[in-house]
Image: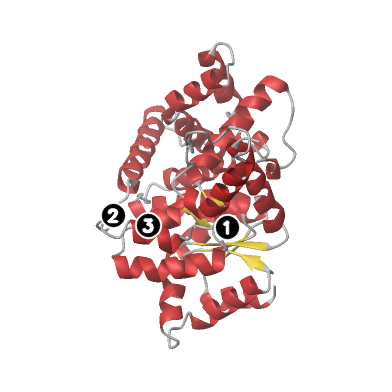
Amino acid sequence: MSIETIILYQKLNIKKEINKKTKIYLDTNYWKNIAEAKASSQNKFSKLYNLLSEKVTSGKIICPVSNVNFIETLKQNHNSRLRVASVFDELSNLVAIDLNQILLLEDILLIHSLNSGESVSNLEKIPIWTFAAFIFGEIDISLPNLNQSGSEKLKHALVNKIKEQSFTEIFNTLSNSPAKETFFRELAKDENEISEKLKEYSKTINKKPSWSQIYSFALTGNLLKSKERIIKLIEELKLPEPNIQFEKILKKTMNVKKLDQYIPSRKIISGIHAIYSHDSARIYDPNDFEDSLHSCLALPYYDIFFTDKSNAKILTSDLLSFDKIYNCKIEYNLEKCIEIIESI
């Protein structure tokens, strides 16, 4: 058995176990606040931390960590990172999710549907959960003689060692790195540029596009920004005429509502972007974009999402209603968050 197959089986086992529990996504501010609560019993988040810890220990809930959480935490100093890493380890059971990998898998499913005619009835078909060690993406493991006969125990031991690596160990490895600035500022700039183009177009035709037109425009823009990467993926899948395949994708995504369960992360970020484009008074900033990335992971793949008030209001707005579409409970009020965990 190859080491890649062993890793796949481990991921499938993670999926099997995690599906028995209520999955809770905490945005990075919640992680930071409960980390401070763990260090100080006088913190107002202490009750929430104690409840989360108790429910994780009893096997009722789990709080997998995203690479967006991790990257944002890298902006903190080393001591603060380690406080957050401690609750990462405790509440996630070292389970992680990577937005880059999710986007890749979602794109593959969409491309596959265009060529097979099959529909995807359940997103659980894809192995989305991974190890803490893979928080920055998959690791290519290649060692001399690893695939020779008699090396099965070595391969299993190696994968188990990787699986057991904690977030605290990863942060300690990065201890000498300075606080990080993320690439979100540049992404937010791109989103604002698309919004401005849409507003200019509205002025040119002297008519404000409908909400559905704005939403489709935003999704098309999202895909066009990823055109080069998607075409490369189509080539790797050995499908003919990659450019024509990409045009088929654009055509399929013209009506967002008919996309069903396909590319939910792209739909979510496009829907949030459309809200900003629809409201000329709104301006994207880097924190808004980070909230969008949290939402791309939380809504399709978790059961509960704790975020800030502004993001919660956008996601549950009448135009989006993402909480209903993705059957994910969204909350920002601390007392209500506590009530939700108490009810599990």
Nearer the viewer's eye, disc 1 or disc 2? 2
In the image, what residue occupies the spot 49% across and 21% down? 231
Q: Quadrant of residue 192?
A: top left
- Residue 72 is tagged as 3
**In the picture provided, is 84 more to the left or to the right than 302?**
left
Name the residue: 37% across, 28% down.
204
Q: Is residue 184 visible?
A: yes
Residue designated by label 2: 180
Amino acid under disc 3: Glu
Q: Nearer the viewer, residue 226 or 134?
A: 134
- Place of residue 22 in the rendered image (x, y in percent of width and height, measured from the top left): 67, 63
Which residue is label 1 attached to? Answer: 316
Mark 2 lies on a secondary structure that is loop
Q: Is residue 268 left or right of residue 283?
A: right
Q: Nearer the viewer, residue 224 or 276?
A: 224
Question: Where in the figure is residue 78, as x and y percent of width and height?
Answer: 30, 65
In primary-sequence order, the first of circles 2 and 3 is 3
Residue drawn at the location 55% of the way across and 11% of the way down? 241
Say few, some or many: other residues with alpha carbon within 10 Å of mark 2 (under 14 / 14 to 19 / 20 or more): few
Q: Residue furthest front?
A: 150
Q: Please name the amino acid that badge 1 sits on.
A: Thr
Q: Tell me which label, 1 or 2, sits earlier in the chain.
A: 2
User: Is the residue 306 above or below the residue 247 in the image?
Assistant: below
Q: Is residue 319 visible?
A: no
State the image coordinates of residue 206 (x, y, percent, origin top left): 41, 31
Q: What distance separates the C-alpha of mark 3 from that of mark 1? A: 24 Å
The Cα atoms of the two marked residues, 1 and 2, are separated by 31 Å
Residue at coordinates 72% horizontally, 35% vertically from top-left?
Answer: 120
Q: Quadrant of the C terminus?
A: bottom right
